[in-house]
Image: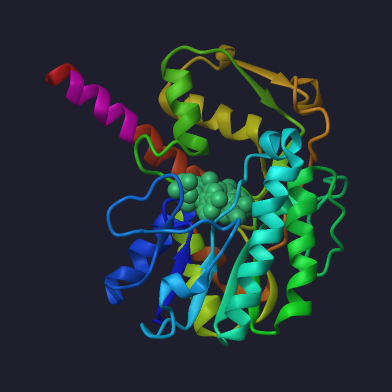
């Protein structure tokens, strides 16, 4: 394993990465911003200062940038503030890391695409329609002007299977079990990918010294409606709670890209048969919730 620091280790993806790296290197650096939990170093990406991280003295060879403001609505409402972090600060940090000859991994997003075609390859040209997507596309484009020691990993929707992890399937399960009526888009397609697979494939990309840009995802494309409907079945909840709608009919979603599905990079294709499938993940999350409800009845 390559000794790696994680910027944004208080976030969902960064926390999962840091836990894995720390199994081998307990002193791997992780940073937080508003949540500086135990073992994390405070770091503001809007005004980055690599010196505070002591990366060279502690022999870190890679820095993963998992810090961002990824909330699409927030970026739309606060373009200047989000740009300061998602673009200006990120590029400043990359410049400092390049000066120290440290490999940079940057997480980009399927939102760099307008969602008109779907099935975007590593080579597809970004066509963002949202502020968040434009910000990710700008960093994708600018990195190569700063360094060639970088890997951009484009992700689609990332979910986990831990109980109450607040990701895609768990959130849907919580809502359905509370009897909430949900509007689920039939025309929004993406490539949902399990967090454990993101961690494993990120490490593979790093070990293999794959540089440039790779799409990292599960190959199967789903809509939110398809996932919610499978989950309702697994939880034995009436699908009448689900209202199938068009994404653009939901207030605030009018300009969202519809089909941002990615084609997984050829360099990661060999993992496909071993990745979590949505069916496995749905069964797992449903059994988490069934188990908790049995325990609470018994207790
Ligand atoms: N999750 C997905 O489905 C997905 C999909 C595609 C791409 N991505 C990309 O993957 C990366 C990680 O996403 P995530 O879901 O793990 O995001 P997340 O849970 O929202 O975590 C964001 C991280 O950024 C940090 N941060 C916020 N403001 C900061 C600042 N001013 N300075 C330094 N750090 C700051 C947060 O720190 P505090 O919490 O301590 O404030 C947190 O550690 C992002 O670049 C995102 O765009 C994620």
Location of residue 72 with respect to 19 vertically, above or below: above
- Position of 52 with respect to 295 (left or right) is right
> From this viewpoint, is residue 277 visible?
no
For the residue pair 31 and 200, the one nearer the viewer reads as 31
Image quadrant holding the C terminus, namely: top left
Q: Where in the figure is residue 7, as x and y percent of width and height?
A: 49, 62
Q: What stretch is highlighted in magenta?
A: 288-296
Q: Main secondary structure of the magenta part?
A: helix
Quarter of the image for the N terminus: give it: bottom left
Residue 188 x/y as whole percent: 74, 36
In the figure, is residue 223 to the left or right of 181? right
Task: Count every numbered label the image shows and give the total.
Answer: 0
Q: Is any atom of residue 13 visible in this view? A: yes
**What's the residue at 78%, 70% (across, down)?**
142
Asked whether residue 294 is drawn in magenta, I would say: yes
- Camera-nearest residue between 121 and 155: 155
Query: Residue 177 in the image: x percent, y percent?
Result: 41, 18
Q: Is residue 231 above or below residue 8?
A: above
Q: Which is nearer the eye, 72 or 120?
A: 72
Residue at far left of view = 299
For the residue pair 221 and 42, the one nearer the viewer reads as 42
Q: Quadrant of residue 124?
A: bottom right
- Look at the image and name its color scheme: rainbow
Q: Where is residue 285 in the image (x, y as percent from the top left)?
A: 39, 37
Q: Is residue 144 shown in magenta?
A: no
Q: Going 48% across and 39% down the picture, which residue do you hit?
A: 167
Residue 213 falls in image quadrant: bottom right
Which residue occupies 64% across, 84% down? 149
């Amino acid at each position: 394993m390559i000794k790696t620091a994680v910027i944004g280790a208080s976030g969902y993806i960064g926390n999962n990465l840091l836990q894995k790296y720390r199994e081998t290197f307990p002193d791997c650096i992780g940073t937080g911003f508003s949540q500086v939990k135990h073992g994390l170093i405070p770091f503001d990406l809007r005004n980055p200062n690599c010196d505070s991280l002591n990366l060279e003295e502690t022999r870190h060879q890679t820095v993963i940038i998992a810090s961002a403001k990824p909330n699409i609505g927030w970026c739309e409402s606060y373009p200047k503030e989000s740009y300061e972090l998602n673009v200006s600060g990120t590029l400043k940090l990359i410049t400092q890391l390049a000066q120290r000859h440290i490999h940079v991994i940057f997480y980009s997003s399927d939102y760099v695409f307008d969602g008109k075609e779907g099935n975007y390859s590593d080579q597809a040209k970004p066509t963002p329609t949202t502020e968040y997507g434009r910000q990710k596309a700008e960093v994708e484009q600018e990195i190569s002007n700063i360094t060639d020691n970088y890997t951009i990993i484009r992700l689609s929707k990332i979910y986990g299977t831990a109980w109450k992890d607040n990701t895609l399937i768990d959130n849907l399960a919580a809502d359905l079990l509370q009897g909430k009526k949900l509007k689920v888009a039939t025309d929004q397609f993406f490539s949902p990918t399990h967090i454990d697979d993101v961690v494993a494939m990120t490490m593979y990309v790093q070990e293999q010294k794959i540089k440039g840009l790779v799409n990292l995802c599960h190959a199967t494309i789903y809509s939110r409606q398809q996932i919610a409907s499978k989950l309702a079945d697994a939880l034995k909840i009436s699908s009448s709670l689900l209202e199938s709608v068009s994404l653009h009919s939901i207030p605030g979603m009018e300009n969202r890209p519809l089909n941002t599905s990615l084609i997984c990079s050829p360099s990661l294709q060999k993992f496909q048969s071993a990745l979590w499938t949505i069916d496995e993940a749905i069964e797992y999350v449903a059994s988490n919730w069934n188990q908790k409800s049995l325990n609470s009845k018994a207790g």
